[in-house]
């Protein structure tokens, strides 16, 4: 007789004790995060811990594995939970969200389909978001990893719609003897171009339209581009507007884009990765006017709503069109009239994933715990802090604003720093000292320091502290000049305009 094996604890009480300690330590870690540096580079021992070549043959005590986590992993996080983190557009998480994610892992539901409550929770989120964005209540929605994936799904749905009875799923891209063309502005996120690549439509068939001084798309240039493409025998099919550009937080004139899409009969999609949720703050909602006219929206709960990573969402006005692009018909996914395999539309009919986790739980718990009013107030608070930082920069002798502040992102540079060497030095220095974590971007071909204030923990005092460390770091950088190196741009292929990333 072979001994049975399984992966449950031998001693449940001991497991409970050990786990309690780990959880307590993590809760303390969150409570005390202000006392730690924003970020620090993994030290040699930590890096070396993850260079082993062979798998551990024998397991160890769970407590010993947790001790390794405490020593080698936990101290070296990205830092986006810290109030002085302003790099990129990242959410800060919440303790409630952490517990929700743990509970979801305990249930270990597979949310690809079937008849269980997790799918009801996911549909609840779709229903709520339909109401936030003034979509019809039957709008269909699905959790995905992030806005990049949601934007990609949009391209597939819009492509399917454009092919109509030519059925691109069955016949492939050559079923249409014309080239589909999409339009977006130069402020769009890089993932929009990537979606064109992945969908087989080709990045060169994404028209990058210029933007105005507020960094919104130029509508007349969009009109011209569409007309020129039609005259050349191409088939325009999609406009991707941006609500909250990743670089500067700019918002396209969504109402006017909706007009163009309507009169030209194009799919109107909005990449609202973080910005769409400005709709939760009554004082910001007018900024995203027109969102309610989109055919689909991509956005993230893991950014401005601080649901733990990852939690992106794709919302589509017309559920039938959404389903047509993905509906699964594999034999083993057959629906039954009753039992666990019952149900009509499963999430696997609305996207490319089959097995998927219970992202809806941490989102539902976040919204239930804090309520829309407080979540909206946190969003509005970051925008107010961005304005405060902008005022400081406007009054400063050393720094200068580089783009208008629409929402929560402040882009600025050092005066008399044409190649951005000082800006670059300041940002790296702040990271390495663990004092603050802004990021660098390239605006109009020149480096800029970028403070994306998303964190619900960031306060007025933190903005004051940020301006102090900025000045101090600039003073040091001027005293000890570093060799001027060109700012490394993200890799991109020949002939491509780099769009914004992250
Ligand atoms: C962050 C961001 C994305 C990408 O979203 P992920 O969740 O990182 O995939 C796309 N567009 C904009 C405007 C963003 O800010």
Image (spheres, grey):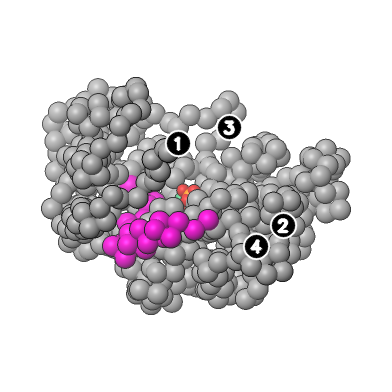
- Which label number is shown at residue 496? 3
Q: Is residue 29 magenta?
A: no
Q: CA distance from mark 3 to mark 1?
A: 14 Å
Dot 2, how many residues are within 10 Å of its Cα: few (below 14), some (14-19), or many (20+)?
few
Counting from the top left corner in percent of width and height, residue 339 is at 64, 67
- Which label number is shown at residue 334? 2
In the image, what residue occupies the spot 53% across and 48% down? 148
Q: CA distance from mark 4 to mark 1?
A: 55 Å
Q: Of the residues under marks 2 and 1, which one precedes in the sequence?
A: 2
- Residue 487 in view in this figure: yes
- Looking at the rendered image, the disc whose residue lies closer to the viewer, 3 or 1, is 3
Counting from the top left corner in percent of width and height, residue 193 is at 60, 41
Q: Of the residues under marks 4 and 1, which one precedes in the sequence?
A: 4
Dot 4, how many residues are within 10 Å of its Cα: few (below 14), some (14-19), or many (20+)?
some
Q: Of the residues under marks 3 and 2, which one precedes in the sequence?
A: 2
Q: Of the residues under marks 4 and 3, which one precedes in the sequence?
A: 4
Q: CA distance from mark 4 to mark 3?
A: 47 Å
Tell me the magenta residue range. Answer: 87-110
Residue located beneath label 1 in the image: 445
- Which label number is shown at residue 341? 4
- Residue 215 in view in this figure: no
Q: Is residue 106 magenta?
A: yes
Q: Residue furthest front?
A: 1
- Looking at the rendered image, the disc whose residue lies closer to the viewer, 3 or 2, is 2
Check if mark 2's residue and mark 4's residue have beta carbons within 8 Å.
yes
Q: Give the left or right position of residue 446, taking residue 331 as reference.
A: left
């Amino acid at each position: 007789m072979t001994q049975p094996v399984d992966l449950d604890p031998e001693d449940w009480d001991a497991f409970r004790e050990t786990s309690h300690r780990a959880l307590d330590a993590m809760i303390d870690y969150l409570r005390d995060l202000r006392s730690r540096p924003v970020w620090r580079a993994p030290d040699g021992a930590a890096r070396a811990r993850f260079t082993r070549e062979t798998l551990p043959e024998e397991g160890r005590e769970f407590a010993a594995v947790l001790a390794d986590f405490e020593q080698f992993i936990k101290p070296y996080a990205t830092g986006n939970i810290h109030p002085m983190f302003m790099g990129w557009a990242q959410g800060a998480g919440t303790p409630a969200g952490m517990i929700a994610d743990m509970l979801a892992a305990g249930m270990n539901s597979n949310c690809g389909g079937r008849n269980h409550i997790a799918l009801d929770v996911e549909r609840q989120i779709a229903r709520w978001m339909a109401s936030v964005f003034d979509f019809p209540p039957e709008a269909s929605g699905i959790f995905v990893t992030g806005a990049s994936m949601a934007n990609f799904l949009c391209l597939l749905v819009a492509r399917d719609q454009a092919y109509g009875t030519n059925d691109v799923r069955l016949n492939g891209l050559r079923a249409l003897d014309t080239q589909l063309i999409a339009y977006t502005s130069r402020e769009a996120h890089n993932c929009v171009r990537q979606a064109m690549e992945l969908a087989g439509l080709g990045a060169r068939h994404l028209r990058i339209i210029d933007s105005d001084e507020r960094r919104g798309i130029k509508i007349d240039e969009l009109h011209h581009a569409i007309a020129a493409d039609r005259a050349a025998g191409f088939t325009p099919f999609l406009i991707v507007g941006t609500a909250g550009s990743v670089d500067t937080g700019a918002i396209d004139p969504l109402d006017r884009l909706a007009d163009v899409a309507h009169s030209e009969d194009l799919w109107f999609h909005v990449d609202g990765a973080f910005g769409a949720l400005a709709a939760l703050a009554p004082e910001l909602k007018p900024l995203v006017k027109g969102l309610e006219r989109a055919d689909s929206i991509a956005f993230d709960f893991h950014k401005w709503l601080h649901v733990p990573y990852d939690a992106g969402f794709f919302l589509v006005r017309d559920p039938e069109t959404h389903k047509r692009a993905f509906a699964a018909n594999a034999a083993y996914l057959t629906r039954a009239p009753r039992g666990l395999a019952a149900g009509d539309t499963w999430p696997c009919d609305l996207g490319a994933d089959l097995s998927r986790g219970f992202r809806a739980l941490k989102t539902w718990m976040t919204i239930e715990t804090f309520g829309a009013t407080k979540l909206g107030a946190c969003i509005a608070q970051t925008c107010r802090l961005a304005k405060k930082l902008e005022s400081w920069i406007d009054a400063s002798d050393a720094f200068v604003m580089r783009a208008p502040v629409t929402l929560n992102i402040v882009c600025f540079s050092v005066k008399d720093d044409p190649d951005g060497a000082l800006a670059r030095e300041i940002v790296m220095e702040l990271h390495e000292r663990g004092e603050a974590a802004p990021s660098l971007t390239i605006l109009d071909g020149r480096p800029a320091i970028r403070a994306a204030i998303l964190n619900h923990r960031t306060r007025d005092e933190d903005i004051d502290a940020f301006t102090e460390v900025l000045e101090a770091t600039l003073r040091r950088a001027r005293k000890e000049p570093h060799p001027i190196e060109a700012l490394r741009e993200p890799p991109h292929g020949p002939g491509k305009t780099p769009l914004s990333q992250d």
